[in-house]
Structure formats: C-alpha cells, structure tokens
Amino acid sequence: MAADQAVDKYEDVFEEEDAPKEQQTIHRIRANSTIMQLNKILVANRGEIPIRIFRTAHELSLHTIAIFSYEDRLSMHRQKADEAYVIGKRGQYTPVGAYLASDEIVKIAVEHGAQMIHPGYGFLSENAEFARKVENAGLIFIGPSPEVIDSLGDKVSARKLAIKAGVPVVPGTEGAVERFEEVKEFTDKYGFPIIIKAAYGGGGRGMRVVREQASLQESFERATSEAKSAFGNGTVFVERFLDKPKHIEVQLLGDNHGNVVHLYERDCSVQRRHQKVVEIAPAKDLPVETRDAILRDAVKLAKSVNYRNAGTAEFLVDQQNRYYFIEINPRIQVEHTITEEITGIDIVAAQIQIAAGATLEQLGLTQDRISTRGFAIQCRITTEDPSKNFQPDTGKIEVYRSAGGNGVRLDGGNGFAGAVITPHYDSMLVKCTCHGSTYEIARRKILRALVEFRIRGVKTNIPFLASLLTHPTFIDGNCWTTFIDDTPSLFDLVGSQNRAQKLLAYLGDVAVNGSSIKGQIGEPKFRGDIIIPQLTDDSGHKIDVTSPSTKGWRSIITEQGPKAFAKAVRNYKGCLLMDTTWRDAHQSLLATRVRTVDLLNIAKETSHALSNLYALECWGGATFDVAMRFLYEDPWDRLRKMRKLIPNIPFQMLLRGANGVAYASLPDNAIYHFVEQAKKNGVDIFRVFDALNDINQLEVGIKAVQKAGGVAEGTVCYSGDMLNPKKKYNLEYYLSLVDKLVALDIDVLGIKDMAGVLKPHAATILIGTIRKKYPDLPIHVHTHDSAGTGVASMVACAMAGADAVDAATDSLSGMTSQPSINAIIASLDGTGLDPGLNVHHVRALDTYWSQLRLLYSPFEAHLAGPDPEVYEHEIPGGQLTNMMFQASQLGLGSQWLETKKAYEHANDLLGDIVKVTPTSKVVGDLAQFMVSNKLTPEDVLERAGELDFPGSVLEFLEGMMGQPYGGFPEPLRTKALRGRRKLDSRPGLHLDPVDFKKIKNELSRKFEGNPTECDIASYVMYPKVFEDYKKFVVKYGDLSVLPTKYFLSKPEIGEEFHVELEKGKVLILKLLAVGPLSENTGQREVFYEMNGEVRQVTVDDKQASVENVSRPKADPTDSSQVGAPMAGVLVELRVRDGGEVKKGDPLAVLSAMKMEMVISAPHNGKVSSLMVREGDSVDGSDLVCRITKH
C-alpha cells in the first residue's frame, strides 16, 4: 500500500467518513506495527532490488529512501520509496557512475536522516570501502563487515581462506593478476581451457572462458576492461575451467554473535555468458552425501571468517559429483527469491533485523527449525533478443501485462507500460518465481506464467525461456553451466506473434497519414456492414450454407483426372460458364484491389449458388503480385482459404507460359516448381498462354501443368481483327497455332480475347472452324466487354460449339470487365445451351458484389460506357484501367486520348504484336514514353540509337519475352539495343536453373524461421516484392483479418469495431484520439482502446517537416559500411580516419547492458567517414565508419 505512493495520506487509504478526527499519515499507520527502534533505510541501488527491499522495509514499519541517476528519473523504484533523491547534478556522473558514487550516496543518507543503507546486489554491494564509509558516517551497513568483504569479496582471498579451511577449490592462480604475462604463465603450466574472472564482482561481467592461445590476450583485455568499468577495479584471477559442471550455491545467514545457518542450496547451472538465467531450489538430483558435504563446508567457511548477514557460498560440482568452492558473494543474490519460497523465510527481513542487532535465535532461524518444502524455479525476464545472440533491446514498452495466480511471484523493476528501456543498465525487466510441491509442478507453473506475459515494444527472452523449460534435459533437471551454449536447438524459438500491437501500428498510421494503398483516391462510399444474401430453394425454404456444397465439376478432376474432366465437359449438352468475378473482373474494374476477406465472406454461398460452373477464375495473373505488393497478403494463403470454403467448383488460374506469373521468362525449373505448388494448394485448371503466342514458351507451361496433374488449358491469344484481310493474325494463323497446341496433348483449348476485339461474326467463324476440325476438343472462350459486344460474341461462341465462356457478376461486368453473367444466361435461354445455373441464386450473389463495389469505390476507373475505339487501339481490358491510373501518376491524365492514340502507334512500331501481359505492358510503356517526351513514330525510328527506352521495351527487343510472329521490327531493334544481345530462341534456354536450396537458406537468414515452398515460389517470381511484403508483415502483422473499411480508412473517433484474429479471438477496438505533432520528432501519439485497455502507438507524420538528427544507418548489402551491431555506448575507439586495417581488426568496443562487443573490420582497407567518437550512444545499425578496399 505505502510502497505505491510516497505521499499517500490516511484519507487516501480509508473512506473519508470513516477517518478518525486526528488525521494521520501512512507512516503513522505503519508505526502501529513497529518492531524495531530504527525507522529509516536507504537502498543504494536501482531496478527491482530496491523495490523488493522497500516492500519488506515497509512491513517492518521502516521509512524508505530511494536514490536515482538522472537517466533513471522515471524508473519505478523511485516511485515505490517514501522519499527519492537524485545522485549529484545532471551530467555530473555517467548513468552507471552515479550508483558507484559512494561519497555522494552516503551524503544523501546522512542529510535525509537514514540510519541504515542496504546496497542490494551489484554496484557497491561488494565494495568494502563503501561499507567503511557507511559505518564511518555513523550508519548501519546491511551486509558483512568491511573486513569480511575484503577477505571474501576478493575471489583470490576467498580462495586462500577456503584452502586454509580445508574446502576443495579448483586449481588457479595463487593471487590476483594484473598483467597478461602472469596469465600466460598459468596456461603454460596448466594448459587450456581456463576461465578469467573479475576479482571484485560477479554477474558475468569481467569473465571470459579461453580455450586456445590465439584468443588469450584479447580475452584478458576484455575481462579486465569490463571489470574496471563495472566494479572500478580491473584485477582478475585465473583458474582451470571445468567442462559441463553444475553450479550449486548455498544461501547463508549469519548474525553478529558468530552464529551461521544455511537455508539450503540452489541449482544455478542454467547460465549464459556466466550470468544465471534460470535458478532452481533445491537442486533436483544432487546426491544427499554431496549436498550435505557442500552445506557443511559452506557453513564452516562462513564461520571461519565470522560472517554476518546474508551471503552465498558458490560451488561447482563435476560429473563425478566432486565439488569445488568458487567464491562467497557477500550480499543478497538475485535468485534469493526461490530460497524464500521453499523455506518460507524472508531473507531481506532477516538482513535488516540482523543489521539492527537481532540474533538468529531471536528471529527463530536456528538450523533445526529451517526446512524446505517443494521446489521453486526463477526465470529472469530480460529485454534481450535470443535470435540475435541475446542482443539487448532498447525502446519504449508499449504493452505490459504480467502473469499471476497461485504459486506465482513477480519481482519487477521497470516492467510497466510506458517505461523506456535504455542501454545504460542491466536488461532485466522482472523476475518470475514459481513454487510447487514437486519439480515438475513448479516447471509447468512457470511455463504457464511465461505464456501469460504480454510485453510489447521491446524484444524479450520469453520465447527462449519457454524453449529452455520444455527441453528434455531441463525437464530431467540435468543441466550444466554451458548447457545453453552446447544446445543450439534451444534457439528454435516460437515467439509471440504480437498481432494486436502490430495491427494497432497500422491503424495508427492510417489515422495519422491516411491509407497508403497505391491507386486509392478518396475513401470508400460504403461505410456500413455488407449484407450477405440468403439463398432459397424452389419452395422458398432457406438453403443451409453453413457448410460448403460438395456438388460440382471438381470431383471429376480429383477422382478421375484431367482427361475425364475434359471428356465430361465436351459431353455436356449446354454451354458452361466460368465466373471471373474473383479475379479478372475486379482486376479490370477495381485495379485488382479486392482483398481476400471480401472473397471469403461470400465463398460458401458461391459454392452453393454456382455449383455447376465450369470453373471459378480466382488466382494467378496480376492478382498474385498485387496481393503482396498492394494488399500485403499472401496469395498462397488466399488460395488455400478459398479452396477450403469452395471445395466443389474447379479453380482456374492464369499462367503466363514460361513466365509463370512474372513479367519475364524464368528458368524452366522455376515454372515446374511454381505449378507444382499451385496444384498442391488448390488450383485445378491452368489457362496457359504466352504473350506472343510463342509455342516454345507455351510448351514449358503446358508440360509443367501436365507433370503436376492439373488440367492443361492451352490458350490462343486473340488479337486484332480476323475479318480484316490487312491484319496478319488471320484464321490460318490461329488454326496453325491450335494444331501445335493439340500436338502438345492439351486437355482444353482456351481462346483469350484480352482486348474484347473478337466480334460476333469472327467468333462464329473461328470457333466453328476449330470445332469442325477437332470435334472432341473442349473449347473455352474468354473476352472483355470493352466495345459492348461481349454478350453477343459469347453467345456466338456458344452457338458455334464452345463448351464454356466467361462472364462476371452483373455489378462487376461490362466495359473492361467480362460480359454480364445474367445477360448471357438470358441470351442462351431457349437455345438448348443452358449453363445449368439458378438465375435467382446468381442474382442473389450479385447483391453482395454491388455493395462491395461501393466499398472499393476509391479504385474505380470511372469509365462512362463501352469504348468501340478498342477495335482501333486494341488495349486489353485489364490494362486499360491500369494505364489510366499510370497516366494520371505520370501527369498525363489530361492527355489520355493522346495516350490511346500513341498506343496504336507504339504497337505498329513494335510490329503489331499480340498484346497481353507482359507484351501489352511493353506497348503501354512505349506509348507513355512517347507522350511524355512528345515523340512521334518518326522521331522514335529516327532517334532510336540515342533514346533511353523503358526497360520493358528493351527486354522485348532483346528477345526476353519470346519470338513475335513475323519477327522483330528492324532497324528499330538493332538501333535501340545498341550492341545488347539478341536472342533468337526461347529465353529460358539461356537462364541458369534456380538453386532452390540456396534461396531457402537466404530467406531463412533474412526473415528467420523456415520458409515454405510457397514462399520460395513467390520469391522466385517477385524477389523484391516478396521481400518488401515480408518486411511489411514483420512491422504490421497479418492485415488480412482487418475489415476492408478500416484497411482503407480510419474509423471515427469513438467508433467501436471488431477484428477477429482467429477463431474465438476477437479484438474490440475504438479510436480515442490522435495526439498533437511533436516538432522535435515529427511524430504523433495515437490512442486506441483495445479490449477495454488504452494503448498508444507512435506514428511518423509523413506531412511533418522535421530536421533529421538521427545517425545514418549502415547499408547491410554494402560490405564497406560498418554498422553498430546493437544499441549501446562506444567505450573505446581504436581507429582514426585514414587508418589502415586488416580483416578482423577491432575498430571499436561497444558496451550495453553488461556486455561488451568488439566491432571488427569486415575486410582489409582504409578507414573513412568515421561517424562516432568515444562515449557516443548509438542505436543498432547506426553507421560507425566505412572501410574502403584498396
């Protein structure tokens, strides 16, 4: 109660009407239970240990004083004390130096009436000189006498005392060593391995294990430097290093009358960098005789020096259960909590009362009355990143929710929301201690507690602790001191997904900066909840759509294979339909921006309403890269989810022949690998096309599909006007191409009219001729309704013998999309070519899409109606809307008519090529290039040798997209390429096969974890897009769960909305406020309420203009740039600008949270652009210098 507020008054604790007349302070209330004459204590420490001591002190009715450095002014320990005072003036001491300023600390204690000083652990706790100063000032030092600290705090002296007392020790130097030559003399005599230890401190600082001569001197220098920095004394000693020992320590208590007791032992074997990570009490499987001997020797050694107060005798136990004394720590230990849990003894209370004069007997602490009950385990939760070699993390804690419940004890310091973790101090946030009747119960309890923690904003070691606690060796209780280093599998971590906070980061960004989705203009017109239609049968009864339908054409593919499917389609009496709403329709009208969640919301209804579809076109083509590029979704995840909800309708994807779903040719094995993954994850029919109708390119895709077991729909791309005798793409051309496709044993023939230029009469001639020549070949026709003749053309195809034609839901049909599905159904009525669909169900589904189109209104192309000019410019439907957007982005929006005309000219310049992705992009890029630079066709031909053509144009002319019918345009090709290679064969033949293993390793290194085959396939298709997508997900998480209206626009202030992260896990969110702009940082704080808790995120305001005072970051891809490996302070700089270095030479020494790290030269060269000085604070990846190669 009193620990929480230094100024709590009686009336704050009790209701006003119950308060007695005489107003009392909280200290008077405490005084009612006083048991000591002393009443004021100062704790000379920071973090969790002062808070721990304050709590016991308050129970003993003591008034408490905290001290703090300027950098610690917001720390929790300052708030938990009754009084708190800063150490010195700002800038007088370093952050650590403040807590080592013994004179200043004693001065504060005297000035403010403290009678006792508790040193905690670390800092001055083992400094005999400090203890003397405390006593000389007339105060009580809570700990051993200065003389005992001198004799035991120095490990060398303690070692001598142990030898004198007959306690076994590890072979080591006789005394402290200060010179490297003394260390080398020891290794020459005893060999390796050895361990170098700081003589005046612990906690892993100033400690190095050395296994070979080559690293001896560097290790000695680092150990002495760390020791001097941490303890003010760089003296070390050396001893033989034992392999795989257990670390057993005994908790001791001694009074002022020579009495010493033990509180049994702790197993502290689980360590990293010689710092304890997990501690257990008592030791699980220590033989009784070994335990008893260790306890006897610990007490004997303490009595031999007349030890008083709390201390810990530490031993190593080898694999033969032989034990060796290491040292006595003359202070309270971090892990004292587990001893308290198993013995029921408050060690800190005993310390204070012994220092005040109490005997052990008065405290009831005689050896016969001390026993243990059950087991306790303590985990130290730190702000360290285990996946990066425990690199300390710094920053602001955004969310902090701790564990609790039966048998769970938390001892925390700066673990609270809003706390700023700096690189100046120890990285521990909180100690979690759990007690249970057995070791296994305690282990399970602490594992449960760790899972309960929610800490966001900084990395923690919780995932590592969970991995450790579930390792078989730990479960058996058989760990040793180097267990962590010896067990790489501990680093196979399952970290927290941090989904909620990442989602808030995105929502905060939208609240401050608006949507960043490219192509979005304004906000959605539709803000309500979309109504899902209900389907009814002929009797008017509601159809149950809680489960998807199982009736459909896909069962033939899965049960009998592609050939049986093709035969069944051909034998069907009507004309089947393929619905393109799920891909090409929204690609053509809404820039491919429809998200997965909005497809899945109507999926089950679709499986019932459209069960007789030939296929649902829902994947591949532009939707693949746009999903990652603009929607931040995994296209494979979309495919799997759609497949689960629509198991009955065949899925068709668009495969760009030898390009896969990319815009350029790829190695053949990349195509085979991609198609294999697509088939495994749910694609049934592959519409394989080539932008130039190059049969060699088509063959790659078709054979890949056949090998994977998919339906191979070999496709002819229709271009131009077959009825115009001046056009080179005539009936003979198409029939010749069909012959070649049939020779490849395709299952279905596809006719792809991507510009919508297939006129009804031409359709009748083309389809009728093919049907006559190949009566058993299923024919599937695709068009766009750009000119407004789409319905007529598709009906003509059906009447001429096509087995399936494409259509889109009414609300997403027409113009650059596909013709209306209901219009086609109506047009086929009475012809005997019924598609087998219930028109009422089809119309019901359209009510969903009509609402959804309004939701995606920011991506509308705003086409007014059909464009018969398509017969002239031949721009594909899907490209037309994209070109309109691109023209606007390039500042050519007012020149749209000119751009369309330039498209015609560009097509002619390139030789009247087939225009479909990616060749349509080539023509479009050249057209916009011509308009931007005000070039006529004559200008292009004349100046081809000097113009910097778009990359796509040069790739086409080089032959990277295949061979065009009729050859490349000359002399344009030769002049534009200016000596670049000219391919006259399939591009894939000139490409090295993809090394999938290498890519997998590279992705694993870049993004942590084990990449899937689908990840690899995505990367091969779009390396940079995939990497950018993964980086986005790391920052913002999986946004596919976010409702679209909040993905595209911010909610209103106070508006409540729900986000379902997964089944049964729902976030209830409400935007509370957007804070003012910080002129210093250019950032705003955004406040959300999440499940009733207020959370805030810091967002960069992209409209703000702020002077950038941050350091430049090192480019990880440039080996000459040397970056700081972590946040910290540069304690030593070993180079200067212009200096020569060799690979591996130390450039600087970085210190952070007990760890020093040498920054080494990555290669030989000269130092340049030195960006730092000694004493500078740096963040991770800050540029330190450049090393220029000779």
Image: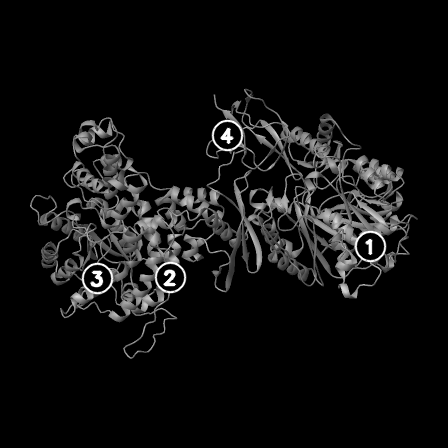
Q: Earlier in the sequence, mark 3 or mark 1?
A: 1
Q: Which residue is mark 1?
A: 27
Q: Amino acid at mark 1?
A: His
User: In the image, which is nearer the foreground, mark 4 or mark 3?
Assistant: 4
Q: Residues within 10 Å of mark 2 (few under 14, many from 20)?
A: some
Badge 4 marks a residue whose secondary structure is strand
Q: Are marks 1 and 2 in contact (CB under 8 Å)?
A: no
Q: In the current view of this chain or complex, which residue is farthest to the left?
A: 725
Q: Amino acid at mark 4?
A: Gln
Q: Position of residue 587 (x, y in %)?
A: 29, 52
Q: Which residue is mark 2?
A: 600
Tag shown at residue 164: none
Foreground pick, 608 / 851: 851
Q: CA distance from mark 1 to mark 2?
A: 63 Å
Q: Residues within 10 Å of mark 4 (few under 14, many from 20)?
A: many
Q: Which residue is mark 3?
A: 566
Q: Position of residue 235 (x, y in %)?
A: 76, 31
Badge 3 marks a residue whose secondary structure is helix
**Is 300 situated left or right of 879 in this image?**
right
Q: Amino acid at mark 2?
A: Leu
